[in-house]
Amino acid sequence: MDAPLTLPDTGFGDLSEGSVYFIGNATTLIRYGGFTILTDPTFLHAGDHVHLGHGMYARREVEPACQIADLPPLDFVVLSHHHGDHFDDVAAAQLPKDLPIITTGHAVGLLAEQGFTRGHALDTWQSQAVTRGATTVRITAMPAKHDPDPVAGMLPPTMGSMLDFGRDGERSFRLYISGDTLLHDRLYDIPQRYPDIDLALVHAGGTTLLGTVVTMTGAQAVRAVEIVDPRQAVPIHYNDYSVFASGLDDIKQAAATSSTTAEFHYLTHGETHHFRPLG
């Protein structure tokens, strides 16, 4: 684990309640424990096109709930991977170049080419702590598989993330972000190493490139929830781009017949999920 990132102690740090604001695609604003965290920033407008590499493009179908200028001051970004629909040209142009970004080694290299100076690379199971006063959030890279054999090597390496919030060595809340992934065997390792997940943000959408599905469908996203076993789940990344083939209705249908005890919360763009730790 790298040395902790230390933020100025603002005197805030409420651990009794937090929130996830859904901006669109995999872009969320997480606020908890005095931290303000942006995930997978994409702010292109509806109708704009994003380059996915290898001559592939996708059209944005849904307007993001806000733009970067509308955001509060950010502490850091958690980026699952550097791909056009997760870190777009707007993010590259408008986010502060000294904003810490916690992501894959591959992404750190590309971010540096774009002028970002504080990329922090994680391999699977590696962690980066961020502290503010007595409060800490520890970000650990989780296993993810984005490119099945038919398109192996065509997509950027990706990671899921576990965010453990706490104070004075006591964990208060555990938040899992799946990242762009398919179902794969290493998902079963997550609840073994990181049990008692409070909230999961699950990427779905059934993204289809060259006829191959490269992110979980709605049914597969629900299966992932069954595997990692969170207390609550919020599906994201389900309708923003033209390459998506499995929408929110698929998730709701699968969740209705699922064996999971997780409580699903469904957000549309601009809505907020408020959460509280147990106890």
Image (tube, grey):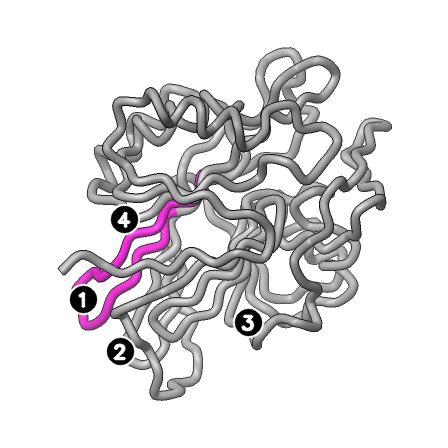
Q: Nearer the viewer, residue 237 or 50?
A: 237
Q: Secondary structure at mark 3?
A: loop
- Is 193 situated above or below 139? above
Q: Which mark is residue 198?
A: 4
Mark nearer the N terminus (1 vs 4) = 1
Q: Residues under labels 2 and 3: Cα distance?
A: 19 Å
- Is 71 situated above or below 114? below
Magenta segment's dominant SS is strand
Task: For the C terminus, give its image quadrant.
Answer: bottom left
Left or right: 213, with 20 as reference point = right
Mark 3 lies on residue: 74
Q: Are marks 1 and 4 in contact (CB under 8 Å)?
A: no
Question: The magenta stretch spans which residues?
Answer: 162-178
Circle 4: residue type: Asp
Q: Residues under labels 2 and 1: Cα distance?
A: 9 Å
List x then y, in percent, for residue 11.
34, 88
Q: Secondary structure at mark 2?
A: loop
Circle 1: residue type: Gly
Residue depth check, mark 4 versus mark 2: number of the one nearer the observer: 4
Q: Residues under labels 3 and 4: Cα distance?
A: 23 Å
Circle 2: residue type: Ala
**What residue is shown at x 46% (from left), y 61% (from top)?**
30
Q: Residues under labels 1 and 4: Cα distance?
A: 18 Å
List x then y, in percent, for residue 255.
38, 27
Q: Residues under labels 1 and 3: Cα distance?
A: 24 Å
Mark 1 lies on residue: 169
